Amino acid sequence: MAGIVSYGTYIPKYRIKVEEIAKIWGENAEAIKNSLEVYEKSVADIDEDTATISVEAAREALVRSRIDKNLIKAVFVGSESHPYAVKPTATIVGEALGLDNFYHCADLEFACKAGTAGIQTCLAMVNSGMIKYGMAIGADTSQSAPGDPLEYSAACGGAAFIIGANGVIAEIKDTLSFTTDTPDFWRREGQPYPSHGGRFTGEPAYFKHILQASKEIMRKNGLSPEDFSYAVFHMPNGKFPTRVAKMLGFSSKQIEQGLVVRYIGNTYSGSSLLGLSAVLDVAKPEDRILLTSFGSGAGSDSLIMEVTDEIESFERNPKVWEKIKKNRVYIDYGLYSKLRGKIRM
């Protein structure tokens, strides 16, 4: 059965703490941390964007896979912060990897679930026999207006997955999507920062879609939360995935390994995929994993995966949590503003 053959991740080294942002706006840092369950977030350097993050994650995935790069016949990059409005990020990735030019290529955009949409697309192409291997990437350098509540969580990072039918470390047993037209979060062309519907982003958006997709895929496969070793849900903050897991019947132990948002923030298209990567870092053969992403606008992709014996010989270092905890460089709000283009120097 087709599934994940390899994965790679990239998280910028720069971090800014909630306290530093709160100090600028005269807000209570402890109250914000308790409310969001986010303590610090990753910040891209001046020369880092969705393209460079995608390339670094893709290179790691390719090196770990030990497959001929020219067998990769599809590259999809999911993001809502592509560096060009007209010019694909995916072609930059393919060129940086040195692929042979004969491959399917496209950028995807569906808020924070474009990365999982890429996985579904690659999976369908592999299962149909169109390609042997495909690469799906979810990466973002998220935007947030100065002083907006999003500023405490909108972060930078990404993950890349090679999908194929040989050397599979985690079989994708099933996948489905739940989609509605729910305008909870949006950014028009030319606008520098997104707008959002406040609490509207919770109940009718995030929770409804995560719950519907997760319940249906478990029902369809005759599974319950107790049948899973791990569960990963999209992480706009630390509170939402913790709450939705409880609503579905998952324990804190099942979600803790993938709950990376507290220390890097919401990496949007990279969020659930970085959580999945953290889980794969420690997963054992026969572990079953539920992954449900969420993208504003709105929709959720849900996938059931089962880890294979191949993971025992798969190179999993450096691990996601090592990247999160080590080599962090904390910055102040002034440098953060410069790096995120909020001020011009």
Image (tube, rainbow, N blue to C red):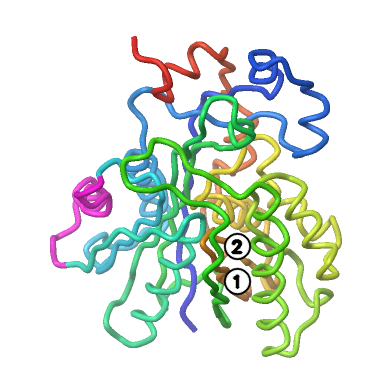
Q: Residue at x 70, y 56 (%)?
A: 202
| Residues drawn in magenta | 85-102
* Picture quadrant of residue 25: top right
For residue 312, the mark is 2
Q: Is residue 16 left or right of residue 12?
A: right
Tell me: residue 288, above or below residue 220. above
Which label is found at residue 309?
A: 1
Numbered mark located on residue 136 in the image: none
Q: Residues within 10 Å of mark 2 (few under 14, many from 20)?
A: few
- Asked if marks 2 and 1 touch (Cβ < 8 Å), the reply is yes
Residue, x 79% and y 54% (percent of image)?
Answer: 242
In this rendering, the answer to whether 187 lies above or below 33 is below
Label 2 – label 1 distance at C-alpha: 6 Å
Percent coordinates x, y for residue 197 in the rendering: 61, 50
- Camera-nearest residue between 239 and 330: 239
Q: Is residue 87 magenta?
A: yes
Q: Tell me the element at label 2.
A: helix
Query: Outermost residue toward the left?
Result: 101
Residue type beneath disc 1: Asp
